Image (cartoon, rainbow, N blue to C red):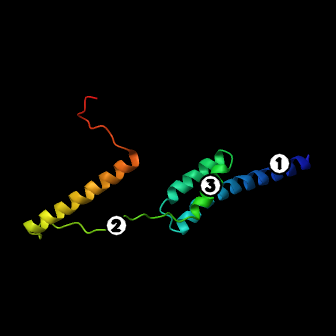
Amino acid sequence: MNWDYFTFGIMGVILLLIVFLIFFFGDAPGKIARERGHPQADAINVCAWIGLAAGGVGWVVALVWAYTRPVGITVTPKLEPANAETMGAQELKAEITNLKGRLEELEHHLEAQTGPKAKQGDAS
């Protein structure tokens, strides 16, 4: 009879160990992401728990995601925009003429690549 209590005690310890390991591994990617200052740490944490519950593949994805740095994309214009408030009338006319020429050049280049297209008003 004493072996029954000992067996249940060992089973209880094993069950507690399994629960501890599930919480340890489930929280690991989120904790890593928070410690590294990842801006998507909450999403990584959710992905880890759902992935762990779904069989483990999502957990691995969350772990890899926790160690990555998001790529920041900044768009900077090549040309500074013309400031219409400080430009005179002649400068504005020259800028408009320059932009019209560039637009025609781009349209010609596009037409050369795609072929001529029918105009919208044509009845053919």
First along the sequence among labels 3 and 1: 1
Question: Which is nearer the eye, 98 or 18?
Answer: 98
Q: Which residue is mark 3?
A: 61
Residue 80: where, in percent of width, then height?
A: 25, 69
Disc 1 packing (10 Å; few <14; some 14–19; many ≥20): few
Q: Which residue is mark 1?
A: 8
Location of residue 1 with respect to 104 vertically, above or below: above
Amino acid type, callout 3 = Val
Question: Which residue: 12% across, 63% down?
Answer: 93
Question: Which is nearer the eye, 24 or 45?
Answer: 45
Calculate the distance from the C-alpha at mark 2 to the C-alpha at mark 3. Answer: 33 Å
Disc 2 packing (10 Å; few <14; some 14–19; many ≥20): few
Res. 25 image quadrant: bottom right
First along the sequence among labels 2 and 3: 3
Quadrant where the C terminus sits is top left
Calculate the distance from the C-alpha at mark 3 to the C-alpha at mark 1. Answer: 37 Å
* Front label number (2 vs 3): 2
Residue 4: where, in percent of width, then height?
A: 88, 46
Residue 69: where, in percent of width, then height?
A: 53, 65
Where disc 3 sits, the SS reads: helix
Q: Which residue is mark 2?
A: 76
Amino acid type, callout 1 = Phe
Amino acid type, callout 2 = Thr
Where disc 1 sits, the SS reads: helix
Disc 3 packing (10 Å; few <14; some 14–19; many ≥20): some
Where disc 2 sits, the SS reads: loop
